[in-house]
Amino acid sequence: MSVSQIHPTAIIASGAIIGPGVSVGPYSVIGENVRIGANTRIGSHCVIEGHTTIGPDNHFYGFCSIGGMPQDKKYAGEPTALEIGASNTFREFVTINTGTVQDIGTTRLGDDNWIMAYVHIAHDCQLGSHIVISNSVQLGGHIHIDDWAIIGGLSAIHQFVRIGAHTMIGGTSSVRQDVPPYMIGAGDSFRPVGINAEGLGRRGFTPADVQALKDAYKILYRRQLNMPQAIEALLDLQLQQPDQAPAVQTLVDFLQASSRGIARP
């Protein structure tokens, strides 16, 4: 079992649980209710506080602020939480807040996410796995981002927005409504321009899958249908192309769950 390496200037509260192989850099502070999984690396001048649980093999670069209380005036000191999975990278000055009792009380991130410098992840956000968030992206509270999404630098996401799986949002976008799975686009406000075909191909989607999703895009955005009509047409598409039905069903499920409405071209 590897031994944790704690710099002598770091401050570790007595109640903190530090796994084997963890390294903590100079002047970092680890709070009383923090649990850190094996082989996680914490750079210099980081603050990890709150009821925060961190899985193994994460890497926090210098000056991260993790587990701070939510920036919500309704917050009254409740013991809300932050949970982070495994093998995530957090570059310099990333900030992540714990949840609030107005939601489920826990901010969550999955595994293998790449979070670049100056990103803010607000209270109650729920992030999946394999997500890339570029520099200076700002996430409001209660945002959900599904697996494999990519968000370009300097973008701002409104609170309660949902971002579907395999989406690609261009830099400096302003996202105020839900972005369905598989979409690519940009703008203020964000406008989808098509299917993220390149990314889907890299992740093992077949050419037939991609073509079916392009057909789904035309149904959703080109045929001037209202949402119930579009969903009905997407269900018909699944019947016509049963091998591609699972990919289309992900889109249907997202649309049926959307409460803010979806971003439009």
Image (spheres, helix red, strand yellow):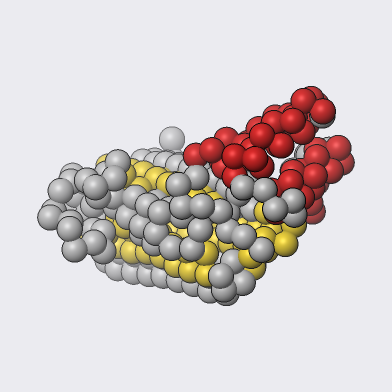
Give whichever of 99, 218 is nearer the camera.
218
Give whichever of 254, 137 is nearer the camera.
254
Q: Quadrant of residue 129?
A: top right
Give whichever of 84, 160 is nearer the camera.
160
Residue located 56% across and 70% down the image: 189
Whether residue 234 is visible, yes or no, is: yes
Residue 120: x and y in percent read 41, 65
Q: Quadrant of residue 76?
A: bottom left
Residue located 59% across and 66% down the image: 190
Q: Quadrant of residue 84?
A: top left
Residue 183: x and y in percent read 68, 54
* In the rendered image, the vertical position of residue 15 relative to residue 234, given as above or below: below
Residue located 79% across and 47% down the image: 214
Question: Going by the image, does 224 lie left or right of 128?
Answer: right
* In the rendered image, the vertical position of residue 184 relative to residue 148, given as above or below: below
For the N terminus, the quadrant is top left
Q: Residue furthest right?
A: 207
Question: Going by the image, does 144 lie left or right of 15?
Answer: right
For the C terminus, the quadrant is bottom right
Residue 123: x and y in percent read 32, 55
Give whichever of 179, 259 is nearer the camera.
259
Q: How many marks?
A: 0
Residue located 23% across and 61% down the image: 72
